[in-house]
Image: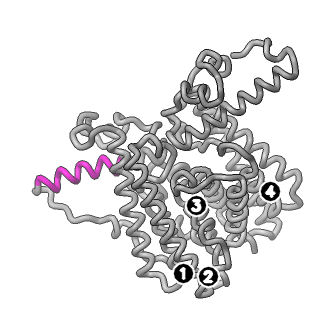
Amino acid sequence: MPSSTLASSPARSGKKSGKREALLQEAARQIIERGAGALNLNDIAETVGLSRNTLYYYVSDRFELLFLCYLRSCEVMAADIDAAVENGSGPTEQLVLVIEKIFAREGAPLAVLSDLDVLPDPQRSTIAELNQRNIDTIARLIRDGVAAGQFRPVNTVIAAQCLMGMIGWARMSSIWLGLSDSLRTRRKTALAISDLILNGIAARPDPVFHCSIDIARLDARPFNAFDKAQASEEKANQLINAASRLFNRRGCDGASLDDVSASVGATKGAIYHYFEGKNDLVTRCYERAFCLYVNFVDTALEWGDSGLEQALHVVHLNCQAQAGANPPLMPQPGLFTLPDQTRQELIGKARAVWASCQKMIDLGIADGSVRNVSSSTVTMAVTGAFLWLPKWLPAAGADNPMRLADQICDIMRDGLLL
């Protein structure tokens, strides 16, 4: 690592600090666009104005750079939480300050901790522990709010994870939805997330929302084991399901093709029999995912009597899916490693689903079931509440996906405030 030569004067020290910050920001941007495993040191060095040799003055390899980016995300969030707790007058204000601080920085968003398995130990364990501390602190803050009579009695772990999911998704949403990313947009997002987690989207205290649809019914397909074409298709689907499950938990870069094939008792050669390579497998996983997302929207439109019910049905079905044994692939970093045409098609599908859900919120505002909120920003924020589920649930999914979906919908519907 660096010697003391650059620290010999304040000017040089400041210049070095500025380069290091630029290095981490550019790396964070690449992590979000390309995924952790695709960090390109040459591209990063060129973008921040460093030679490849000078780059090694700051980091020894891409794994150390990834570790430093993840470490920065954890440390900055910890500092934001500490500052909010110190300056806020109570749990409600503290929670708002945490969210505001996280989105108040200019430059590239902080790296999303979605590909921890790319890191070797002990770096991976270090980041996981620091991240868990931040989640535990948020949960404790919410628990303090319940004890103080400011928040409704809720499962504080679920509430904290929902909030972390919304924050993580917001950092990636501009890439997936083809939107501009600016400080003004981030501040608007911070306000929307704060309002959502505190007040929910419901306009009035209606009877408790209930979804009776079992996700397994929507994903069921007829299958004839004696039909060779169907048998072949089913084997490919098993690999897609296994890959989606592993990619959700470990990131597309954190799970290898060997991991995918081993999880279903097959060989790596089986994957190349059905897919051209990893990018093809990832693409097929996304195709399955968006078929499900569209199905969830169509089902919600059929079952929901109001805009609020339609929106909550979408949340409930997605929660069930992500908490189950075969979740759809969640939108995650690495979109820019896919071919241009594939990337544009996926962005188009993501925007179409987002627009359909936004219309549900707009309908709810018009029919009086949803509060007067920014439908576009709230729709984006709500999505993060269920996309993050595979990151913290057990590998086999939730013991009771329906119950978990009920709890998350309750928070999204009514918020934390009493």
Main SS of residues in magenta: helix
Q: Is residue 112 left or right of residue 286?
A: right
Amino acid at dot 4: Leu
Q: Is residue 298 left or right of residue 33?
A: left
87 w.r.t. 312: above or below: above
Label 1 and label 4: CA atoms lie apart by 30 Å
| Of callouts 4 and 3, the N-terminal one | 4
Q: Given contact means CB atoms under 8 Å apart, are the residues at marks 1 and 2 in contact?
A: yes
Label 1 and label 2: CA atoms lie apart by 7 Å
Q: Residue at x 71, y 72 (%)?
A: 199
Q: Which residue is mark 3?
A: 385
| Of callouts 2 and 4, the N-terminal one | 4
Residue 401 location in percent, x, y?
47, 63
Residue 185 location in percent, x, y?
68, 58
Secondary structure beneath label 2: helix
Amino acid at dot 1: Gly
Quadrant location of the C terminus in the rendered image = bottom right
Secondary structure beneath label 4: helix
Secondary structure beneath label 1: helix
Q: Which residues are magenta?
A: 228-242
Q: Which residue is mark 4?
A: 97
| Of callouts 1 and 2, the N-terminal one | 1
Dot 1 alpha-carbon crowd within 10 angstroms: few under 14, some 14 to 19, many 20 or more:
many
Viewer-nearest residue: 418 or 413:
413
Q: Which residue is mark 1?
A: 307
The numbered dot on residue 365 is 2
Dot 2 alpha-carbon crowd within 10 angstroms: few under 14, some 14 to 19, many 20 or more:
many
Viewer-nearest residue: 20 or 238:
20
